[in-house]
Image: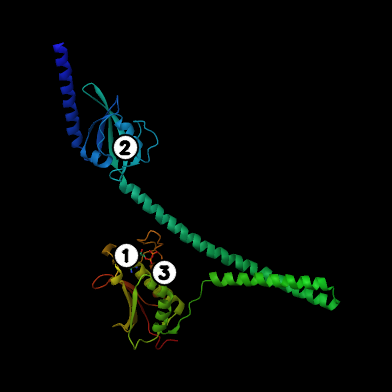
């Protein structure tokens, strides 16, 4: 009996020793590693990276419980690698399984390689693609509407002409009155359809820019009026600081209004999260050293990092979950079309300044 007890306790000690050896070996590996007993699936050893990512289970069926806790796993065969999201670290790993024979025991060895960077790059590529698709779809809807309107306009005009001709013939022949009434009703419907089509055309037609002399105070007034309710709702003050002697600018009024509207809207959005007392928006207008008219929209939002500042005007750059990131890129093309410059600078005391320059109208036709 005694020798048998001695053998059993030596075996246990040997097993403990093996587990310690395996643990210290795993600890030397810089990514998550664990060893599971082949028989009961219990965790025999795991390094710290493994515990940080997947938690430290130690009982029976640890392997089965681990696999059940991972999203992205489709089968629990220890043979194939899987790409999974680890619940504790919320990072992505590729799992690789292998078999190790240590002191007569069979262990299933798990190593996990961090693939988060690849998954994130894929995700951001996918969302850029989706946005591109969305914009191109928006454009094609516009083009489709324009083409349809153009195609339908001609036959509708012809229908109205034929109906007018028929009405004249019926009139010359002196009746019958029911036919005349039916023709008048048909003409009214055709004219109605033509009016709908022409409204669609008006809506989707790319407007030819028209540059004249315009007062910046008037443009600013229109934009502030459009956003007044939104500003009131956010208890946000809009302060106007336009130089009294600001000369008129040579510009397409609607286009410049669009640019200013976009900048002021972005400024309001940037201040959504700051305390109400800080929410001040200031629109400045002055003539700069180059003699251009400069309009500046100054907010007290979070501001932008240097890196963000560099990417700001590239199409599809956005930090908003529902943003498209094309507003500033469009503003820049509009301002450059006007021979001006769209710019960003950090605001002294916190926040951002987004502004643009425009040539004065003086001396231009
Ligand atoms: P969107 O508003 O759809 O994101 P924009 O092109 O108008 O597209 O803006 C691009 C990005 O520029 C925004 O997502 C935001 O990160 C940044 N931005 C623009 N205006 C401001 C501002 N006033 N303060 C801070 N960040 C801004």
Residue 299's disc is: none
Residue located beneath label 2 in the image? 95
Q: How many marks?
A: 3
- Frontmost of labels 3 and 1 is 1
- Compare marks 2 and 1 and give the one earlier in the sequence: 2
- What's the distance in space between the residues labelled 3 and 2, CA to CA? 45 Å
Indicate the position of residue 111 as horizontal and vertical percent values: 27, 36
Residue 273, disc: 1
Determine if residue 31 is in view. no
- Whether tag 3 and tag 2 are in contact, CB under 8 A, the answer is no
Marks 3 and 2: which is nearer the front?
2
Marks 3/1: CA–CA distance: 26 Å
Query: Left of 182 or right of it: where is 286?
Result: left
Q: Which residue is mark 3?
A: 330
Residue 296, located in which quarter of the rendered image?
bottom left
Please rate how many residues cluster around mark 2, counting C-alpha atoms within 10 Å: few if below 14, some from 14 to 19, many from 20: many
- Disc 3 residue: CB within 8 Å of ligand 1: yes
Question: Under tag 2, what secondary structure?
Answer: strand
């Amino acid at each position: 009996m005694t020798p048998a007890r001695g053998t059993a306790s030596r075996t246990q000690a040997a097993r403990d020793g093996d587990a310690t050896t395996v643990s210290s070996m795993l600890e030397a590996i810089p990514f998550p590693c664990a060893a599971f007993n082949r028989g009961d699936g219990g965790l025999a050893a795991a390094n710290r990276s493994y515990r940080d990512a997947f938690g430290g289970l130690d009982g029976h069926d640890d392997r089965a419980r681990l696999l059940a806790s991972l999203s992205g796993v489709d089968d629990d065969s220890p043979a194939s690698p899987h790409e999974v999201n680890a619940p504790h670290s919320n990072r992505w790993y590729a799992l690789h399984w292998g078999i190790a024979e240590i002191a007569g025991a069979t262990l299933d060895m798990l190593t996990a390689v961090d693939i988060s960077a690849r998954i994130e790059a894929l995700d951001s590529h996918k969302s850029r693609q989706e946005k591109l698709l969305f914009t191109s779809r928006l454009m094609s809807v516009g083009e489709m509407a324009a083409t349809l309107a153009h195609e339908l306009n001609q036959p509708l005009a012809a229908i109205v002409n034929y109906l007018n001709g028929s009405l004249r013939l019926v009139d010359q022949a002196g009746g019958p009155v029911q036919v005349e009434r039916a023709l008048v009703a048909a003409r009214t419907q055709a004219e109605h359809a033509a009016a709908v089509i022409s409204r669609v055309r008006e809506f989707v037609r790319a407007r030819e820019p028209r540059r004249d002399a315009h007062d910046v105070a008037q443009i600013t007034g229109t934009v502030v009026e459009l956003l007044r309710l939104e500003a009131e709702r956010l208890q946000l003050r809009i302060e106007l600081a336009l130089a009294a002697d600001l000369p008129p600018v040579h510009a397409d009024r609607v286009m410049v209004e669009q640019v200013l509207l976009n900048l002021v809207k972005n400024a309001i959005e940037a201040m959504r999260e700051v305390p109400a007392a800080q929410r001040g928006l200031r629109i400045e207008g002055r003539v700069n050293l180059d003699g251009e008219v400069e309009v500046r929209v100054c907010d007290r939002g979070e501001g932008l990092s240097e890196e963000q500042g560099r990417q700001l005007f590239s199409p599809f750059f956005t930090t908003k979950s529902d943003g498209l990131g094309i507003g500033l890129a469009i503003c820049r093309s509009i301002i450059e079309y006007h021979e001006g410059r769209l710019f960003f600078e950090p605001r002294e005391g916190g926040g951002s300044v987004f502004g643009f320059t425009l040539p004065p109208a003086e001396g231009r036709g």
